[in-house]
Amino acid sequence: MTSLIGLSGSLRRDSFNSSLLRAARSALPDGVDLKIESIAAFPLYNFDDEKAHGIPVPVAALKDALAGADGFLLCTPEYNNSIPGVLKNAIDWLSRPAADIPRVFGDLPVAIMGTSPGAFGTTLAQNAWLPVLRTLGARLWTGGRFALPAASRVFDEDGRLNDAAAQERLEKFVRGFVGFVRETRGSIHATESK
């Protein structure tokens, strides 16, 4: 079984990006599990708090989940042409302490996707994530891009993706990422066994 962790960068109850993650989960091939995690309980990062109280329980649990996963699906909104603050805050927490970055993110296959009501999807936010993920040592999948525009028209009132062309693109995207995850994880395990 291939295990993926998915994170939505929106805290909104009816988030389009959370809906997109659920649609991605339903588009996965057999033998793949996508566990959608939440960042709602993460406090704002403050080094003084970390020093005084350590890593918060929800952060530690998600770090362990990522460290045990085969891949990571980052579903980002786009706020003011860039990264949403709550998701950047979560990644900042997940990278603490710095000595733990290789365990959590090192060589972890990551795909970025997102949707927004605007005409360009989340292209600028996805681009803004590239140096962050590179710094963390993640293994970014560059075989496809999924930035879905006009979110209010392609999701119904129950948060279901109701656009056939978008659904077809999403299936192709997630299947491509799963192939990359399986290939990457297989090559890492083969190297480790030598």
Image (spheres, helix red, strand yellow):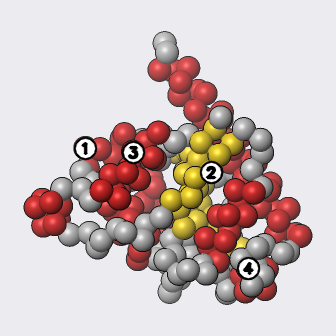
For the residue marked with disc 4, what is the amino acid? Asp
Observer able to see residue 110: no
For the residue marked with disc 3, what is the amino acid? Asp
Q: Nearer the viewer, mark 1 or mark 2?
A: 2
Kindly report the distance in space between the C-alpha atoms of the residues bearing marks 4 and 3: 32 Å
Callout 2 environment at 10 Å: few (<14), some (14 to 19), or many (20+)?
many
Label placed on residue 34? 2
Nearer the N terminus, badge 4 or badge 1? 1
SS category of the residue bearing label 3: helix
Nearer the N terminus, badge 2 or badge 3? 2
SS category of the residue bearing label 1: helix
Image coordinates of residue 126 in percent, x first then y, are 56, 68
Q: Nearer the viewer, mark 3 or mark 1?
A: 3
Q: Nearer the viewer, mark 4 or mark 3?
A: 4
Nearer the N terminus, badge 1 or badge 2? 2
Image coordinates of residue 33 in percent, x first then y, are 65, 46
The residue sitting at 27% across, 54% down in the picture is 96
* Contact (Cβ within 8 Å) of mark 1 with mark 2: no
Label placed on residue 158? 4
The residue sitting at 47% across, 64% down in the picture is 38
Nearer the N terminus, badge 4 or badge 3? 3
* Along the viewing direction, whichever of 179 and 131 lies nearer the viewer: 179
SS category of the residue bearing label 2: strand
Kindly report the distance in space between the C-alpha atoms of the residues bearing marks 4 and 1: 42 Å
The answer to which image quadrant residue 106 occupies is top left
Label placed on residue 64? 3
* Contact (Cβ within 8 Å) of mark 2 with mark 3: no
Label placed on residue 99? 1
* Contact (Cβ within 8 Å) of mark 4 with mark 1: no
For the residue marked with disc 2, what is the amino acid? Leu
Observer able to see residue 97: yes
* Along the viewing direction, whichever of 115 and 8 lies nearer the viewer: 8
